Image: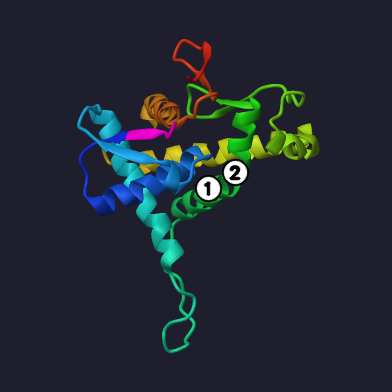
Amino acid sequence: MTPRITLPALSLALRSALIVTLISVLGGCTLAEVKVNVASERTSLENQILGSYNSLSEETLLVASVRGVDPLGRIQTPPKKSGEQQDAIVAMQVLSFHADDVDAFKRLGWVGEGNQGLLQSFPLARDKAPDDLKDFAARYGQREFDAVVAEVNKARETVMRRAIELNANLTQADGPKVRGVFAKLAADTAKPGDKLQAADGNWTVKR
């Protein structure tokens, strides 16, 4: 089943930028796999965070669109960015780079989406790997797996902090609530078979 994200009523350009960010943050989905439903049932906090997502998306898309050479062949100097901006952009790139591996980890049951917006690791069971992932499962060692999960979670933490910084109505004290919203979005985009942690800490498998 194709994962669906329910978003508040936004312009087409705004929704497009938001989709790119959600995919990069949560990993494991491609543009073709995500469908968007427009609705207005989001809470005020969720809408604020979605607005921050959009700002972060625009930052990342702007960097991706900057040309190194102008039409006359002259080298262009990229606009300067704050340390926080640069960290967030690098985090988005890390999430995009590892998206395929995270998707495979989920299919293998090696990771689940925790209730704090981060990946949670499970034992590397290889005996039930689907045929198309047998080679992948065989070559991934514990150390490499742990390193990838740590990188992804660190990048997610950076993106969550940046989402707060981009919204004047949020402070770092809102961190737990922001994590909860990220976890909810992860659950919304999860595929059947993905492991999800509920708010009470219990784990389920998405049907």
The amino acid sitting under disc 1 is Ala
- Is 63 within the magenta? no
- Towards the viewer: 118 or 173: 118
The amino acid sitting under disc 2 is Asp
Whether residue 101 sits left or right of residue 195 in the image: it is right
- How far across and how far down the image is residue 206, in percent? 49, 20
Q: Residue at label 1?
A: 91
Q: Residues within 10 Å of mark 2 (few under 14, many from 20)?
A: some
Q: Which quarter of the figure has residue 102?
A: top right
Chain part drawn in magenta = 1-5
Q: CA distance from mark 1 to mark 2?
A: 16 Å
Q: Secondary structure at mark 1?
A: helix
- Per the rendering, the mark at residue 99 is none
Q: Is 95 situated above or below 58? A: above
| Residue 203 seen by the camera | yes
- Frontmost of labels 1 and 2 is 2
Labels 1 and 2: the sequence-earlier one:
1
Q: Residue at label 2?
A: 100
